Amino acid sequence: MASSTLLIALIGLTAFAYFLGRQRAIVGVVAAKKGTRPFHSLPGYYGGYVALWCVLPALALFAIWHAVEPVVLRAAVVDALPADMQQLSEGRLGLVFNDVRNLVEGGVQLGEPDPTIAAAAERYSEVRQTSRRLLAGTVLVLGVATLGWAVRRVRPDFRARNRVEKSIEYLFVAASTVAILTTIGIFVSVLFEALRFFQQVSPFEFLFGLNWSPQTAIREDQVGSSGAFGAIPLFTGTLLISGIAMAVAAPVGLMSAIYLSEYASRRVRAWVKPLLELLAGIPTVVYGYFAALTVGPFLRGLGDSLGFEVASESALGAGLVMGIMIIPFVSSLSDDVINAVPQALRDGSYGLGATQSETIRQVILPAALPGIVGALLLAVSRAIGETMIVVMAAGLAANLTANPFEAVTTVTVQIVTLLVGDQEFDSAKTLAAFALGLVLFLVTLALNVIALRVVRHYREQYD
Amino acid sequence: MSQPSSTPAADAADAAASAAPPADQQAQAGYRTVGDYRAEKPVMRARNVDVFYGENHAIQSVSLDIGLNEVIALIGPSGCGKSTFLRCLNRMNDTIESARVTGDITLYDEDIYAKQMDVVMLRARVGMVFQKPNPFPKSVYDNVAYGPRIHGLARDRAELDKIVQTSLERAGLWSEVKDRLEEPGTGLSGGQQQRLCIARTIAVSPEVILMDEPCSALDPIATARIEDLIDELKRQYAIVIVTHSMQQAARVSQRTAYFHLGKLIEVGDTDEIFTNPRHKLTEDYITGRFG
Ligand SMILES: Nc1ncnc2c1ncn2[C@@H]1O[C@H](COP(=O)(O)OP(=O)(O)OP(=O)(O)O)[C@@H](O)[C@H]1O
Ligand SMILES: [Mg+2]
């Protein structure tokens, strides 16, 4: 039986369990009118309780089975191989196993399969079929068994409501655990790859080196095979572009937030706010070619007429367009926090004869500051992480410069270029992407920590 | 202005001659206020004031004087328009989009709804204390200094210090906060916060102080302190207080106005109103048969 069929059957069984539990309680309630004890919870809770008991153990078994099955299959396949092949190294054996699996799954094959592989594949599918049958049987039996056990517990004094409440709590815990574990998992894998990189290139050179040209040889005899992995040009490029972007987005976003929340009438607000938020919905690739094809040449022309040397791919162009893109991140969030400032504070200020702009500057903005800082930091991390616009508009040249009219490159752009194309998985060039990723991760983490601290500081002060 | 008389003396003479308002004034609203709505030394005069929130007619043809050196209490069941009327007096209703005010309100014979009226200056002259203490998220000092700063009332820091100190002293808060002027005002207790708000209001030397249920969030001790303060402030200001407590109205006010569903039903000396109400609705309310 295929896994999907099994799961559908399990859902059916669960629905049945729900109705059974509920029905038992309803019948019990009707009986209670004739003098027996009343039920502790509403019938739906008994249904929920029985359904949960029916489905959760079965699902757990299903998951464990699927985790263990590959190991068993592999052992079975290796067993079926001729003795000389069993002596192969772990890595070789893995390749053989992959071949076998490809054969079974109908993956890409080159020519007639090797007879030993074919035999092993035969064995593989045999074992797997048995395993699946066994799984279907045990899962359904387990479901029915736990169902039966739970149904028997449906009695008047059984507190189904509290039990269901508890299991819902576990559900939420499980959900947040998934999120946390995923983050930790990503971090750890990035960390390990980065450590491998640092075995080839010293962290000192990476963090403080001024030269970035990550060409490594694919063949031994290739020319120019030694790479330089000094990431400082990338950091300064990222800083420069994010700085330009924030210089655009922070004032414009903040002022539009103030206009929207304090000055605009309700009708204007209903129109303008969604329009502004639309900016965030435009795909970044569209911004990218806007920056590369419109803003870049425009800046270049402007520079020419003013006597500046502006590269057609410049940090300025990319930064400006990125700033426009992140305006809604600043304005929308700031608008929300400004709106959340209690009307009582505004009234208090107006009641003392303050004008609107005095009220905004001296009362509303200070009160909304934690939220505004949060919005700005969010925008910063968005700017740091943005890739597409920079790829298209700021170029790939890792220049170490603070001149916004020159081409620069950023951390994320380099990650992309490092991983595009054919790569060896353990070359320094590929691993450098992980080191850069680690740096990005740590910087964003630091930004978040700072944001939280700022927010908490003000909350203590003003609550 | 529908009342031609402007000097306090003439008004007092008027009051003696006829206790009831001219009948035509309230003909439209279909009711007559019982008692004399005029004050001996009027600072503010409201005549035939109507307020609409969209379609909702929240105040109907109300005429009332606010007198110098006296406290007038506005009482009445919830939703009858006390706050709305109060907010007309310093044009706080301007901040509500749907609100529309008609009628005449004057501050020392100056029409406060006239075009040339500077609303910002009006609010400095007619100060307001709100129901919930609403200190700014600033230090105690900056809270009190806020008004003087924006109005440029102090020439230097020493003068500002002086204003802050006297305001806090008059609000009866100085001794409690003199060592924590730099701490946030929001860190004070509720009663202290409310006195801070009062200090903030008197720091700009208003002529009238409007208080909207200033004690509703406070315990009896803090309430007593604020009532003492009101008594003290009345020597210099004209004070309007909205309250839900009859006892408080009786304790602090000299005149009382009873509102009911947007109408000013009865107004008169507090002693009179509480011992001898003339209107049935007033009597029901103060004897606890209503609201
Ligand atoms: N901002 C507003 N928008 C629309 N209607 C309002 C607004 N404020 C008050 N109203 C309406 O005006 C009427 C009078 O309200 P107001 O707040 O003046 O009553 P109140 O006498 O102060 O009541 P309370 O004693 O409960 O404070 C009520 O019907 C209320 O619903
Ligand atoms: Mg009110």
Image (spheres, coloured by chain):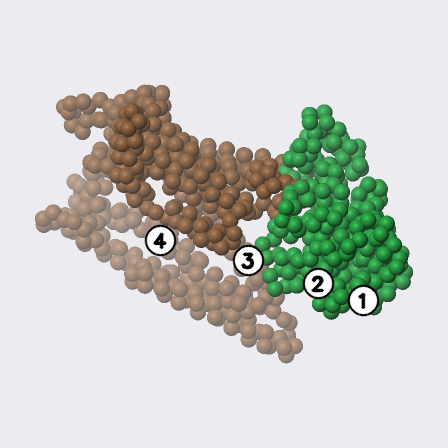
Given the image, on which type of amino acid does mark 1 rest? Leu
Q: Which residue is mark 2?
A: B60
Image coords of residue A333 (percent x, y): 48, 44
Whether marks 3 and 1 lie on the same chain: no
Given the image, on which type of amino acid does mark 3 rest? Glu
Q: Which residue is mark 4?
A: A65
Whether marks 1 and 4 lie on the same chain: no
Given the image, on which type of amino acid does mark 4 rest? Trp
B276 displayed left or right of A103: right
- Residue B218 appears in the picture as rendered: no
Q: Secondary structure at mark 1?
A: helix
Q: Which residue is mark 3?
A: A165
Q: Are marks 4 and 2 in contact (CB under 8 Å)?
A: no
How packed mark 2 is, by other alpha carbons closer than 10 Å (few <14, some 14-19, many 20 or more), is many
Q: Secondary structure at mark 4?
A: helix
Q: Which chain is green?
A: B
- Residue depth check, mark 3 versus mark 1: number of the one nearer the observer: 1
Q: Secondary structure at mark 2?
A: strand
Residue in the image at 89% along x and 57% along y: B16
